Structure formats: structure tokens, C-alpha cells
Image (spheres, rainbow, N blue to C red):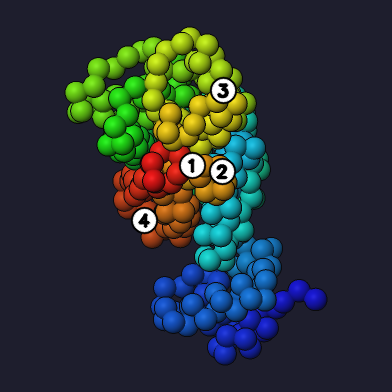
Amino acid sequence: MAATVHDVARVAGVSIKTVSNVIHEFPHVRPTTRAKVLAAIEQLGYRPNLSARSLRSGRTGVIGLIVPELRLSYFAELTDAVIKAAERHGQVVLVEQTNGDRARELEALNSPRVKFSDGVLFSPLGMGVDDVAALNVSYPLVLLGERIFGGPVDHVTMQNVQAARTATEHLIAQGRRRIAVVGAHEGEVIGSAGLRLAGYTEALAASGIEFDPALIAYTTLWHRANGATAMREFLATGVQFDAVFALNDTLALGAMRVLQESGMRIPEDVAVIGFDDLDEARYTLPALSTVDPGRTEIAETAVRVLLERITGAAKDQPPREFLAEYSVVVRESSALA
């Protein structure tokens, strides 16, 4: 049988009222008591009765998460992190996928389905700065990603430019001077590809290395197949290079496969670094160096900020921007032993 609030109270050694206070996020509960109740909830797999909760509080205890596509490992891992963060606050997450299509993103923001949630975390890929007015919705909304800046809602994102610059500087510190980029988007300025390319060019300039457009390999989507195709086409040009900065890890995985098939040794002949620090990056041969963009921090911050808007704790504050901390994770693919 499903666990009840009585079971949670018994395991945590507190009253039913205290369990209710924790579930409803009342601020006067002591941190140690809150931790015991949350641990009991997780241990028992307790899920609040959302219908009854909604009638009492006017809130459902459900938050929405709109992402481009779960087939991309980054968004799958981000979704997992959001669900875990939400569970720690007694929240349930409803996930919707848009495939990065602008029309579907706009439809999702105005869909009747949002009525099932108290607020939404939204990561657009098709929308851009011209769509900022679409973020003026009647419910709490927190924006994720790099497509729109300076909008009317809170925004949680990563330090794309600085992180990409640091990743490139790592390759330069290894003595690499002909650093190819895999995954650039033609003409993009605002967006993950444009911002990361900007960080790359900043690093070159700071080191006195001339930018060579022949070293930039363009793609559309950021899947393994795109990384492999871009690397095959790049090798066919005959352009000399001694390192690769792939703008995400899945591109890096595809590119590494093609490099190894061509007989090139990693990192002896070509150093490789990616971006995102996917779980699978540590298990490649060689293990992939990458940028950890602070995905867990992004998820936890986004959930916390959304709940502040839902509960009214931040109702008098203007839209806020939060930047996650990042780090370069050096593994076998970019550093000689």
C-alpha cells in the first residue's frame, strides 16, 4: 500500500502536523526537523495527495519543465537533476518536450496543460530574442538556457563565454595552437553555439593566436551523428589541426570516433575537449575532458527560484539572473600523461 502521512510522521518521529508543515514549506520548521521529515518521505516513497493539497492551499505541488528534447543527453541529465531537486521540496515535475521547435515552444507556454502546475521551468531552443514578449505569462515562469536574455522573468543559465574561454585556454596550455571547433552555428551570436565560439575566440586573442575561420566546423543539431559528420567533412578539407573543442560532449563523442577511425591518436596527435560533463564522458576511451557547466546547480537554483515566485517569497523582486559556477574537468583526451 502507498505510504501515508501517518507513516512519514512515525518514521521521522514527529507529529502529523509537522509533516504537513514541511510538505507545505512553512518557514518556521527547524532545519533538522525538516531534514528528518524529507528523509522519511524519500525512504517511504511518500507522495502527497495532490487533489486534497490543491483544495487546501490553492497549489497543486506540481511544477512543469519544458525542454527541447530528452534524446539529447544534456537535457535528460538536466531533467533528472530538476526532478531530484523538486522532490527535496515535495514537488512533482511534469515534463514536456518541444523538439526545439519555435511554434511548439510558443504553444507550450500558452497550453491549457500549464494549469496542472503551479509554475514552469522553460528551456527554449527555437525561440529567440524577438520572442521575449511571449514570456509575459500569467503564472510563475523561470527561463533556462541561452536563447533569451533580459526578459521579464527570472533566468538561470551558465557562463558559456567564460567557460568556453577557459576550456580553450586549457588546450593552449597543452601547447596546442591549431584548435578546431566542432558545432558552430552559422551567423549565431546569442545561443550556446554563438556564446561558446565567442569564448574560444577570446582565448585565442588573449594568447596572441590568430583566428582561422578554416578551423571552424559548422553543424545544425548537436547529436553524435552531427559531430561525426562534421569531423569527416573537416578532415576532407586537409586543414591542419592539433586540437578539437567540441561545443558539447555528444558532438565530441562523434568526432572522437571519426578521429580514431582515421588513425589519429588522442591526445598525442589531437587533444579533444567537450562541454557539458555528461556522465558517459568519463567512460569513453580515452576519457573525455570537458566543461562542467554547473548543471546540478542550475537545476537546484531554478527549482528554488520558481518556488520563491510560487509562494510569493520573491513577489516584490524584479526579474533576476543567476549564473552557475563552472569548472574544466581534465581527463585523458586532452592531457598527455
From the viewer's perspective, tell me whether residue 147 is left or right of residue 171: right
Q: Tag 2: Cα neighbours inside 10 Å, few (<14), some, or many (≥20)?
A: few
Q: Quadrant of the N terminus?
A: bottom right
Q: Is residue 98 visible?
A: yes
- Please name the residue shown 56% across and 18% down the image: 232
Q: Is residue 191 visible?
A: no
Q: Amino acid at mark 3?
A: Ser
Q: Amino acid at mark 4?
A: Ala
Mark 3 or mark 4, which is nearer to you? 3
**Eyeballing the image, is 111 above or below 242?**
below
Q: Which mark is drawn over residue 314? A: 4
Where residue 63 sits in the image (x, y, percent)? 57, 53
Mark 4 or mark 1, earlier in chain: 1
Decide which of 224, 15 is in the foreground and name it: 224
Mark 2 or mark 3, which is nearer to you? 3
Q: Which mark is drawn over residue 288? A: 1
Mark 1 or mark 3, earlier in chain: 3
* Mark 3 vs mark 4, CA separation in Å: 55 Å
* Mark 4 vs mark 1, CA separation in Å: 40 Å
Q: Which residue is mark 2?
A: 284
Where residue 92 sits in the image (x, y, percent)? 61, 58
Mark 4 or mark 1, which is nearer to you? 1
Q: Which residue is mark 3?
A: 262
Decide which of 118, 101 is in the foreground and name it: 101
* Mark 1 vs mark 3, CA separation in Å: 18 Å
Mark 2 or mark 3, earlier in chain: 3
Where residue 317 sits in the image (x, y, percent)? 31, 51
* Mark 2 vs mark 3, CA separation in Å: 17 Å
Q: Helix, strand or loop at disc 2?
A: loop
* Mark 4 vs mark 2, CA separation in Å: 43 Å
